[in-house]
Image (tube, rainbow, N blue to C red):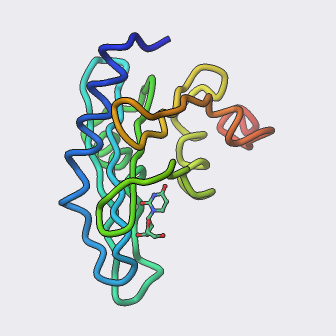
Amino acid sequence: MLDNTRIKELIEIALQQLPYAYVPYSHFHVGAALLAKNGKIYTGCNIENAGYTPSNCAERTAFFKAVSEGVKEFDAICVTGGKDGVPTELTAPCGVCRQVMMEFCDPETFEIILAVSTEEYQIFRLKDLLPMGFGPKNLA
Ligand code: THU
């Protein structure tokens, strides 16, 4: 379980990513802060593309940064987002990002903080956002 200091830290770091979002098409900025089990925090923003399908969500940017550096174990992620970079309601991860989480995280324990601000947020477990998910264990 994350303590309050950690929660606020992850929210602040996710909020700090909003200006980096490359979103010329949707204008919907998303920021993420991914906490690895080794204590390191990997950041991410969404990166859109004129071809649309190559667009990458903030969550996957953070995961791919970590995995590309050899880090594959995670405790939590914070996600925040909003039109023109202003969060007004919770932004939940898309289905593709939930599946990427399923690849590297324990659905029973991995915590997903959806935040509007350091005062307004909700915490979910991966198993709540991706019930009966298909993951590496199914292929073991
Ligand atoms: N997006 C994310 O980056 N993460 C989410 O959790 C939801 C959606 C992005 C994808 C696209 O760049 C924009 O938000 C609008 O869908």
Check the image and name the residue furthest to the right: 132
133 is higher (above) or lower (below) than 56: above
Question: Which residue is at a point 34% across and 31% down the rendered structure image?
Answer: 118
Residue 70 in percent (x, y) is at 30, 35
* Nearer-the-camera pick, 67 or 14: 14
Residue at position x 49%, y 51% in the image? 89
What is the x, y in percent for residue 36? 35, 26
Q: Which image quadrant shows ligand 1?
A: bottom left
Q: Residue furthest bottom?
A: 50
Quarter assignment of residue 50: bottom left
Decide: is 112 above or below 109: below
Where residue 47 sits: x, y (%)?
31, 68
Residue at x-position 40% and y-position 73%: 55
Q: Is residue 34 above or below residue 99?
A: above
Where residue 53 appears, as percent x and y from the top left, is 47, 80
Residue drawn at point x = 38 percent, y = 67 percent: 83
Number of marks drawn: 0
Q: Quadrant of the C terminus?
A: top right
Would residue 21 appear left or right of 113 to someone viewing this image?
A: left
| Front residue of 38 and 33 | 33
